[in-house]
Image (spheres, helix red, strand yellow):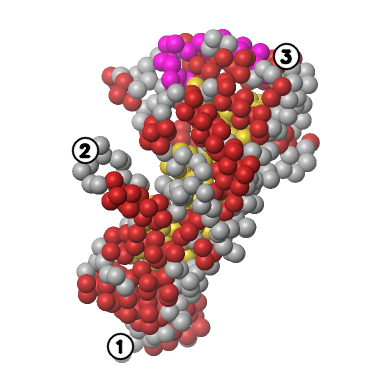
Amino acid sequence: MEQTVPRTVLNNDVLLNILAVSDTLTICRLMATSRQLYHEGPKHLLKKTVVLRSENKLVSFLTFMAAEAPYRFQFLHSLQIDIGHISEAATITVEYFFISAAPFLNIRRLTLDRAEEFFESGTGIPGAFALCLRTVEHMKVSEIGRRASIFLEHSRSRLVSADLTMIPRPIPDDSDDDSDEEREDDDTDDSRFRNPILQLRNSQETLKTLNVRWCDTDCEIGVLYEQTYPHVKDLTLSANELPYTTHYARAFPNIETLTIGIAPREIDELGTAMDDFVEHRYMNKIDQLQNGKWEGLKSVHGTLIDLFLLGALCPVERVHINGPHMDKRMFRSVLTTARPAYVNFQAFDVDLFYEQDFTHLVRGRWLEPVRAFEITVFFAGILTPEEVDVPKALEILVQGIKQMPSLVSLGVTLCCYGLHPGMEGSVVRFGTRLPLCPAEEYLRDLDLDAFARRIRDAAPRLRSVGIALIGHRARPGAFATLGDGPEAYEKDAVEALPLRHPTGILSLLPAVLSDLSILGL
């Protein structure tokens, strides 16, 4: 007699539990099996960021969201659109959806890539997004032009963080035949749609973090912005205009960390003579005295030129200077004004230690406030490996440290990646490695503990020394410490920073070395 296997029926509670831990494809299949799972599925499908990279996916997604409307709207919390221009039919669908769904949407995180192209698709899209997206707290927008700027300026959302990339200002063309009046009008429009101080005005009471690329706050002489963002603590300005420090200090009076990187073409337009740099710094300082400055900053990051032109007239606890450019006059001017307790030289080539430049640089009263110093030395970033004299460089480093009058904590990272042979010649026939250059041989055998003691013997006032070596072809990354550890200092004390730094670098080292080994380095 033929026997049949009884059919197993799972109750809804079990199916709902399965739904909660399933991948996207499984959830979609389960939704097709019952009305209840069809209803419950969207809350799980929409847990992660929804990423839309084509017009077809955009329209399909909006159709999906409209099913059981407005039930599904509440579950969409994070949305990324990276499509660019869309058709007229799709534009109508987008506008209708956001206007209809506005009272029910709960989007907290929004990313718009190629925003200007997208908003150019229809005159109503910027307004629909601005008026209907009212709950966004974290926003990232790239390629911001006039239409994307309209969206930002009229947005009903109260942002906590914003990451904005503007369309760069066109490079002036000497052959342009347009009238001066037309160019003046264009510049006025350009500065407005690159100006986050104006664009984010509806988030003045909520914004805490701002990251802007290609910022432009230029305006008529004597005009001061009324907008103030009192809760912004972290401000990053990349590919920036020549800094208008008063604009930043008035708009963001309470920032703690400022990172600034001036666009190279802006520096090129300023000129090459030292007098040009001094004049811009002087005008920034006068403007701050007359119209407003920061009371103090916890940390600033930038190249020496960036920080010099910024000309901030306030104490700065931590000054991070990115290499490779160094100028003694600029350095002393920055430190004299900032009076930092901590200084970090990041990514400076070993040529800094030739011709006694380093010992001259760190000598003088402007170093008196510095209690903690950190430096990352790149070997052969500018010099060729054959030109690198490691013993000479390390001796000058020691002599320079010896001169720093108030230093109690030191961190040194020796980075050897620049000593690697070029990719095309790194591995010869039959997989044989190229021999180490003299600099690599010296660093291979360098005793980090002995080097730390050597520094301590030269500067007995040092309580803590941390030495790290990374990126060497013939030895693993290593670090050595001497004296007091981070636990000996108070929480957030600058003296502890150089001691944590080597460990932080080495935590990233295994992945880097793995990639290099694959390449045969």
Q: Mostly what secondary structure, the magenta segment?
A: helix
**Label 3's element?**
helix
The magenta segment: 378-401
In the picture, measured across the screen, residue 158 lies left or right of residue 289, that is left
Kindly indicate the quadrant of the structure image that contains residue 148.
bottom left
**Label 1's element?**
loop
Mark 2 nearby-residue class (10 Å; few <14, some 14–19, many ≥20): few
Q: Which mark is residue 135?
A: none
Question: Foreground mark, 3 or 2?
Answer: 2
Question: Foreground mark, 3 or 1?
Answer: 3
To which residue does mark 3 refer? 458
- Three-letter code, disc 1: Glu
Nearer-the-camera pick, 367 or 67 = 367
Q: In this view, does 416 lie above or below 212?
A: above
To which residue does mark 1 refer? 2
In the picture, measured across the screen, residue 486 lies left or right of residue 165, that is right
**Which residue is located at x 37 percent, y 53 percent?**
188
Mark 1 nearby-residue class (10 Å; few <14, some 14–19, many ≥20): few
To which residue does mark 2 refer? 175
Q: Can residue 483 be seen in this view?
A: no
